[in-house]
Amino acid sequence: MEQVLLQRLQDAVLTISFNRPEARNAWNHALEDALRNALLAADVNPDVRVIVLTGEGKTFCPGPDPKAISSGQSHRAVASSSGDFDQRYSYMLGLRKPLIAAINGAAAGVGFCLTLYCDLRFIAENAKITTAFSRRGLVAEHGSAWMLPRLIGWMNASDLLLSGRILAGREADAIGLARCLAGENFLTMVEAYARDLAQNCSPRSMMIIKQQLREAWSQSLAQATAVSTEQTSRCIGSEDVAEGMAHFLEKRPARFRSLA
């Protein structure tokens, strides 16, 4: 795992970095397996409250490893499942803890798709991203034709998928795909945001809000409102609400419990 991923835990924020410098962090089966194992382990680790995903060096993940493509080993048959959050990469949305993509450099193809399954995306101003599928004779892969319209609207999704053109950080920000930050100290700024979540927000609240966001995609407004009313009733009188009010009134750091 250490050959393809670097992991650093600090202040309850776990930063996971793709680490294949010889291939510019290109995607392969070993990297896919290592990432899945690392994310699932982090999700049950009480010391981790927020996860940041980035690339070591100057790239995020520029897509499949060309060597794997040329040898016919880039495609992978996976067992079919009917669960929306039990697909090859959609399990990332099902994590209990916030997952933040820090797109520090080139992200294309599957590397681009991975970021869609993160809860939040930050992109360096000079980073370049592309779906690339239509320019490689491929189709919209990994559920991207479903995810993109919901994230940035039908027209923007059609533009990115049909053209396969390259866009940089500021345009990604303009269409609502990612928050653009300056390239200098980029990861430091993303991790500062992650630390704010880890230190000041209830892990239980964030877990339930993530669940609400996922379920809302297939709910009516009435259904989503009913769920929020039920969850709010459960919160009233809870230890987390008591702590939330106490640290606010006492003007001190929060002391929320970690998820078990």
Image: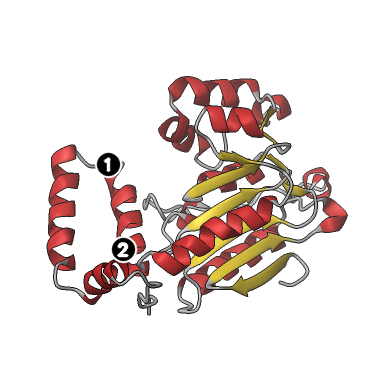
Label 2 secondary element: helix
205, 68: nearer the viewer? 205
* Amino acid at dot 1: Ser
Q: Indicate which disc residue 218 carries.
A: 1
Asked whether residue 78 is in view, the answer is: no
Split into 4 quadrants, where in the image is the N terminus? Answer: bottom right
Q: Which residue reaches farthest right?
A: 22
* Amino acid at dot 2: Ser
* Residue 218 horizontal/vertical position (percent): 27, 41
What residue is shown at x 24% (from left), y 68% (from top)? Answer: 245
Image side of residue 55 versus residue 189, left or right: right
53 to 3, vertically: above or below: above
* Residue 83 horizontal/vertical position (percent): 37, 53
What residue is shown at x 67% (from left), y 70% (from top)? Answer: 7
The image quarter in which residue 14 lies: bottom right
What residue is shown at x 76% (from left), y 57% (from top)? Answer: 56
Which residue is labeled 2 in the image? 205
- Neighbours of disc 2 within 10 Å: few (<14), some (14-19), many (20+): some
What residue is shown at x 72% (from left), y 29% (from top)? Answer: 136
Nearer to us: label 1 or label 2: 2
102, 77: nearer the viewer? 102
Please report whichever mark, 1 or 2, sits nearer to the chain's N-terminal start. 2
The Cα–Cα distance between marks 1 and 2, rounded to whole angstroms, is 21 Å
Label 1 secondary element: loop
Q: Indicate which disc residue 260 carries.
A: none
2 to 225, vertically: above or below: below
Asked whether residue 53 is in view, the answer is: yes
* Residue 37 horizontal/vertical position (percent): 58, 69
Split into 4 quadrants, where in the image is the C terminus? Answer: bottom left
The image quarter in which residue 54 lies: bottom right
